[in-house]
Image: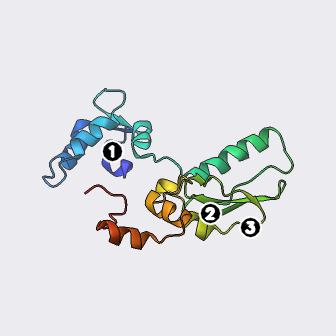
Amino acid sequence: MFSKLDTNGDLYLDQAELAAINLDKYEVCIRPFFNSCDSYKDGKVSTAEWCLCFWREKPPCLAELERIQVQQAAKKKPGMYIPSCDEDGYYKKVQCDQSQGECWCVDQHGELMGSRIHGNPECDEVAGYSGDFGSGVGWEDEEEKEAEENGEEAEEEEEEEGEADDGGYIW
């Protein structure tokens, strides 16, 4: 795309070369976008600025794999944990460290706290009760917890009190 826009071949996109895109009335964000790409503030977008502007952060598992590869090139460590990534570069649901004999559950971004065990964890159950954003913290309704401890059913308490369970949300 850059080479098509760079009509004079100088490896910079100047205002004249960006003018055709800027004139499109349906692309109201183009001018501010390209202005934000001009990190040198010289009125032109270089190939380096273009690449930085379109660069995306790598998914966490892929980034960790690349970091490990750099470390391994520096010094070989036998038994080093290597994460398992899915095809999009995020962590697979179950991760195992063979050298430690431990496995644990993860969401796309990392370990679900409290799931690390010797053997294979039941990640479908853990992930379903991981709380918001894979925090590993579950949420229980205090009334239900107290009712279970007292051997009562939460439904009976609600009927007696005449209140409906709102699921903890404030409406």
Amino acid type, label 3: Asn
Residue reaching furthest to the right: 78
Q: Residue at x 87, y 49 (%)?
A: 78
Which mark's residue is nearer the viewer, 2 or 3?
A: 3
Residue under label 1: 6
Residue 9: quadrant of the picture: top left
User: Mark 2 vs mark 3: which is more N-terminal?
Assistant: 2
Residue under label 3: 120
Residue under label 2: 92
Amino acid type, label 2: Lys
**As displayed, is residue 80 above or below residue 118?**
above
Number of residues whose C-alpha sits closer than 10 Å to that of mark 3, classed few (under 14), some (14–19) or many (20 or more)? some
User: Mark 2 vs mark 1: which is more N-terminal?
Assistant: 1
Residue 100 horizontal/vertical position (percent): 83, 54
Residue 126: quadrant of the picture: bottom right
Q: Residue at x 47, y 72 (%)?
A: 153
Q: Identify the secondary structure beneath mark 2.
A: loop
Which mark's residue is nearer the viewer, 2 or 1?
A: 2
Q: Identify the secondary structure beneath mark 1.
A: loop
Which mark's residue is nearer the viewer, 1 or 3?
A: 3
In the foreground, 84 or 48:
84
Q: Is residue 169 left or right of residue 59?
A: left
